[in-house]
Amino acid sequence: MREPVTHLDLANPAFDVTSPAVHEAREQDWYAETPYGWAVLRYEQGQAILKDRRFQQGNARWPAQNGVHDGPFPQWWAETLLSLEGPDHLRLRRLLGPAFRSRAIEAMRPHFQDLATELVDAFAPRGRVELVGEFAEPYSARVLCLLLGLPDDHWAQVAHWADDLGKSFGVNLRRDLPRIEAALAGLTAYVEEVVAERRARPRDDLVTTLLAAHEHDDRLSARELSNGLVFLAFAGMETTRNQIGLAVQTFLRHPAQWALLAERPELGAAAVEEVMRVNPTVTWVTREAVEDVELDGLHVPRGGIVQVLSHAAGTDPRAMGEDASFDITVTDRPPHSGFGGGVHHCLGHFVARTDMSVALPLLARRMPDIVADGPGEWLPVSGNTGPVRFPLRFSAERSLPDHPGVTP
């Protein structure tokens, strides 16, 4: 007979999904109860659910789960790639997909390298940095502007909208709704101006490519184009910014790994995977049952919600081995769920993997002995998490210029 199932209060902003309480619950059973349904705590069952076609994304119900039932935000949320299912989801992924292929993104690596170097050069001589405001946010926002063909000097306004719209992933959604809806209105109006400009003066960029898909064969409606660009703008910036901060937080706990990354920049890609395994910004991945499902003793009725807890699954010793500690030299770990899974695997994962694999080795080389300069300010460790402010200090005299031409 099963022991009583643990209850994890994911809706509580003070709850930490990486805490010992979650690890203890994982040892008791592979799932726990939450205010949103069930939390999946072990790797094997989490991967099975992400690949199981009896489950769909489930994010469409997130606004209603937070008491938001009408208005512009839930309407837009229901129409994003994150919430769509079936033929519409597949059609939009196929239309957007070519712009995010690995070859196209890899060709942008030198631009990412130049951008990261420019930002680090501005603060390295001081020996201090507020990582979010001086690096993670401008870097991720300017990468996004580069990808979408937006003016580089617009990055701060785009980042401001993206930051506020990113609060829609948080457990304080209802409290933050006025800021979310203001950001949605501002970013939508901006995107529509960009689309109108590209219609008049096409360029070799993503917006023009998507506009051609809309105008030439009408497979992409005007509303789908606008919604898709708004979603790409905020999702691409917010998650990368958060993940860079979480990466540095992780390396602060493992200084020998930071030193190794500085010496061996080719480990940048492995560092990204390890960070997302143990300290992901997307702390859970949602799925909704489209029929009654029986799975390892758990009955999930049709419409039931499960949340695969990314950190719990990614550090599960049953899958990762008894020594599942952070190690960027280990390259044979099972895939993490930081980019989701199944048909809803993150479309922009090549962008995030590439720009972070450039940024992290550079930061390690230029800030070799970093320490936290105060507690900073952090989002709840539930929902999408990361730093709001992350002050650091390091020995300026030990900050080494990046090797010319080095591409990790």
Image: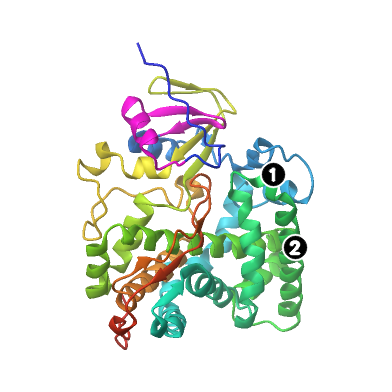
Q: Quadrant of residue 404?
A: bottom left
Q: CA gap, disc 2 to disc 1?
A: 29 Å
Residue position marked by numbered label 1 in the rendering: 174
Q: Secondary structure at mark 2?
A: helix
* 8 within the magenta span: no
Residue 4 in view here: yes
Q: Position of residue 308 (x, y in %)?
A: 45, 38
Find the magenta span and give its range.
16-40
Residue 30 part of the magenta-drawn span: yes
Residue found at the far right of this picture = 71
Earlier-in-chain disc, 2 versus 1:
1
Mark 2 and mark 1 residues within 8 Å of each other at the beta carbon = no
Q: Nearer the viewer, residue 268 or 349?
A: 268
Considering depth in this image, is 182 or 229 the residue closer to the camera? 182
Q: Which mark is residue 222?
A: 2
Q: Amino acid at mark 2?
A: Ala
Q: Is residue 297 left or right of residue 197?
A: left
Q: Is residue 347 visible?
A: no
| Amino acid carrying mark 1 in the image | Arg
Nearer to me, 28 or 230: 28
Q: In which quadrant of the rendered view does residue 27 lie?
A: top left
* Crowdedness near tag 1: few (<14), some (14–19) or many (≥20) residues, C-alpha within 10 Å: some
Looking at the rendered structure, the secondary structure element under dot 1 is helix
Q: Where 155 sits versus 316, above or below?
A: below
Which residue is at 46% across, 33% downward? 39
Q: On the image, which quarter does residue 107 sit in?
A: bottom left
Nearer to us of marks 2 and 1 is 1
Q: Give how far across and how far down residue 37 sits, in percent.
A: 54, 29
Q: Residue at x 66, y 38 (%)?
A: 66
